[in-house]
Image (cartoon, grey):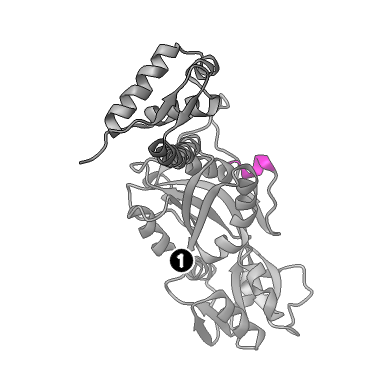
Amino acid sequence: MSIDVDVRHLRVLLAVVDAGGFSAAATRLHVAQSSLSRTVAELERRVGVRLLERTTRRVHPTAEGEQVIALARHTVAEVDRALAHLDGYLQGSRGSVSLAALPSLAACLLPPVLAEYRRERPDVALTVVDGLARQVEVMVGAGEVDFAVSSRPPDVDRLVSIPIATDRFYALCPPGHAWVGRESVAWAELAGSDFVQFTAQSSIRTLVDDALLAGEVSLGRTTQASSVVSVAGLVAAGAGVTVVPALVGPLTSFSGAHLVPLVEPVLTRQIWVVRDPLRPLSRAALALLEVITGARERGLVLPAGCAWVGRARDAKGEECPTRTTSGLLGDHSG
């Protein structure tokens, strides 16, 4: 047989015991003494044993009462902790937030954002999952993460994108190369150079291929690699030069390869937050999204060659609504 007792009964019992009597407890709680007496009597009826011995001046727990009181303290404390956690979740100060990002964005764009967020909401658990552009898009669509940060708008019309930053492209060349020390290199100067390419799955590869095609630049021998570390290592070893966005640049510094700004034209890529508007975000996730989209106003620092995009506003100064991917594809320069 189960015992039908709720937390209200236990709180009243503890209040009476801690105050030393019904009268003192009623005064502390600002309720009628008769109300407390009825609640304790009901609790005793439900548990089937007498819990308190009443005297003219004080109440004393019975042997069974001592055990019930100990359990009551533990139960009430656990309930209070759970309610505090729930309140924190509803207020956005507790809970968890997960986001996906391209590896370079996870390493070089998100850290100042997450550090700022952590200072404001230290009790929220953060998870960052990195992957290629298509992978992070799939994670958002499947509800595996709250949102993603990517270098392209998604292919799925249901998802929406918010522009948050831009970064420009640089040539990456090995130590001792003729370009080392120059202020800039024109895209046309890549013609005939041995070149280290990212594999076709990389969003960087698509952007660079489009730029080379638009400039009618023909490369020399090519070598392919899938990761930034591998590409930088191959460049440093003399396998060729390559082209990387500014947010990839810091990840190549270990190799000793040199970054030189590319011009004629100066090519930039857009960085986006991608989310599913059909999946509501928790207050904690909304707060992180607010930090990301307001990063420029907060003065968060990015590597050289990168810039935050301020919130889009209309002629009246009102923030523009998030646009769908179908309206953003034209903004994606190759």
In the shown orientation, is residue 168 left or right of residue 142?
Answer: right
Q: Is residue 162 visible?
A: yes
Q: Is residue 296 magenta?
A: yes
Q: Nearer the viewer, residue 286 or 90?
A: 90
In the displayed structure, 24 sits above or below 287; it is: above
Residue 14, percent across and down? 47, 30
- The N terminus sits in image quarter: top left
Residue 325, percent across and down? 39, 47
Q: Is residue 265 visible?
A: no
Instruction: Check disc 1: other Cα within 10 Å, few if <14, some if 14-19, many if 20+.
Output: some
Q: What amino acid does circle 1 point to?
A: Gly
Q: Nearer the viewer, residue 238 or 208?
A: 238
In the displayed structure, 114 sits above or below 244; it is: above
Residue of label 1: 131
In the displayed structure, 83 sits above or below 276; it is: above
Residue lying at the far right in this picture: please name it.
181
Residue 24, percent across and down? 54, 17
Q: Which residues are magenta?
A: 294-298
In the shown orientation, is residue 5 left or right of residue 234?
Answer: left
Q: Nearer the viewer, residue 51 or 107?
A: 51
- Residue at screen point 47% across, 38% down: 73
Q: Main secondary structure of the magenta part?
A: helix
Residue 6, percent across and down? 34, 31
Q: Is residue 314 magenta?
A: no
| Badge 1 element | loop
In the shown orientation, is residue 140 left or right of residue 101?
Answer: left
In the displayed structure, 171 sits above or below 160; it is: below
- Residue at screen point 70% across, 72% down: 259
